[in-house]
Image: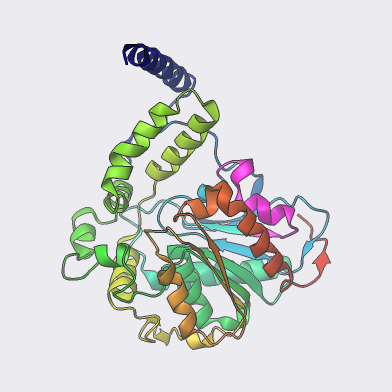
Amino acid sequence: MIPYLISESLRNIRRSLKLSEWLLEHDFLPWSEDRPYLIPNVKVGQTPRVELYKDDGVKLYRYLPTTEKQYETPLLIVYALINKPYILDLYPERSVIKKFLDAGFDVYLIKWGDATIADQFGLSEYVDIFMYDFIDYLKDYAKVDKISILGYCMGGGMSAIYTSLYPENVRNLLLLASTLYFGKDVGGLVTLSDKRFFDPEEVTNVYGYVPAWFLGERYKLLRPLENYVTKYVSMFLNAENEDFLDLFFRMERWIHDGVNVAPYAYAEYVKLMYQENALCEGKLYINGKRADPKKISMPVAAIVGKKDHLAPPKNTLGFLDYVSSNEKAIFEADVGHVGLVVSSKAMKMWDEVADWLAKRSGKKIVREI
């Protein structure tokens, strides 16, 4: 017993030294009242891209192709208003964006940016102005009539709303861990957003927007022991593994490097979607226009994590019952919400997703950069 304790004590010293060495080799992102964390400045989002278009802090990027020819139907990624989209491009070996590029897709991304107290946007502005204008621009730029859309989390909800309004612009719709169906049996954030216990306007009325730290801590509360204790114990126990530390702190950066969200968009999404299930029930209106999921008749793919506690599989799969598409595909991985885009277990699944989309994206062409 005593030799073991001595050995483990010495190993803990080595772990401490290795962790200290790693931290000393990296600087930290600036601290702010909206992100009151020490965030390591590790490299993320390294896939080359160019900015094509911007409006009021919202930007449209095109990722530089890695193949000589690309499928003629562009793929637009619509991320959530919450957090930053580099989780889809965390580093080259774990990059969903690079997966699509290497498979021959022409990939674009809407980056929403950081809301301020001056950005009093609602769902109507994000869906019917920003998304509408950016997709219109992309269609003109790529010289196509339709695009494919991949929406992640809240971005999947916004993509489904847009597609319900303008199905003529969408060739394929991919819903990645998307928050769409909100039956009481879903669990996860649906339970946390129960209107008996949570009113989003109590947050927005205080700050004038939704602070990044509030959203980050809110999601951690679903699994407090894991998020506040056990993952850091695991990090220390693996501190001698530099690759483990690199991935761990990349994830820590993304988790804590959030964005502020516009108040009306957040309050409307929680009330109309989470609390009223308005899209599925055909009660959601954007600028007076009814968002009817029955108009989603193009091919639809649902991509879910079996262990997802933020957007449980039914959050996405339940929505498929409300669309009229005759081509519905389901892709599953035995991972959680974030694991869907960073876990080695999920990377093989993305090859299957890319193959499914390739068969529905037309011929390959050369498109100028």
Compared across the picture, whether 112 is left or right of 95 comes to left
Residue 303 included in the magenta stretch of the image? no
Judging depth in this view, the residue of 85 and 134 nearest the camera is 85
Residue 332 in the image, given as x and y percentages of width and height: 54, 64
Residue 97 included in the magenta stretch of the image? yes
Judging depth in this view, the residue of 16 and 60 nearest the camera is 16
Span colored in magenta? 90-107
Residue 1 in the image, given as x and y percentages of width and height: 32, 16
Residue shown at 27% from the left, 46% from the top: 224
Q: Quadrant of residue 146?
A: bottom right
- Residue 195, relative to residue 93: is it above or below? below
Residue 137 seen in render:
yes
- Residue 120, relative to residue 236: is it above or below? below
Residue shown at 79% from the left, 53% from the top: 67
Residue 34 seen in render:
no
- Residue 229, relative to residue 98: is it above or below? above
Q: Quadrant of residue 314?
A: bottom left
Quadrant in the picture for the C terminus: bottom right
Residue 17 in the image, given as x and y percentages of width and height: 42, 15
Residue 198 in the image, given as x and y percentages of width and height: 19, 64
Q: Quadrant of residue 115?
A: bottom left
- Residue 19, relative to residue 201: is it above or below? above
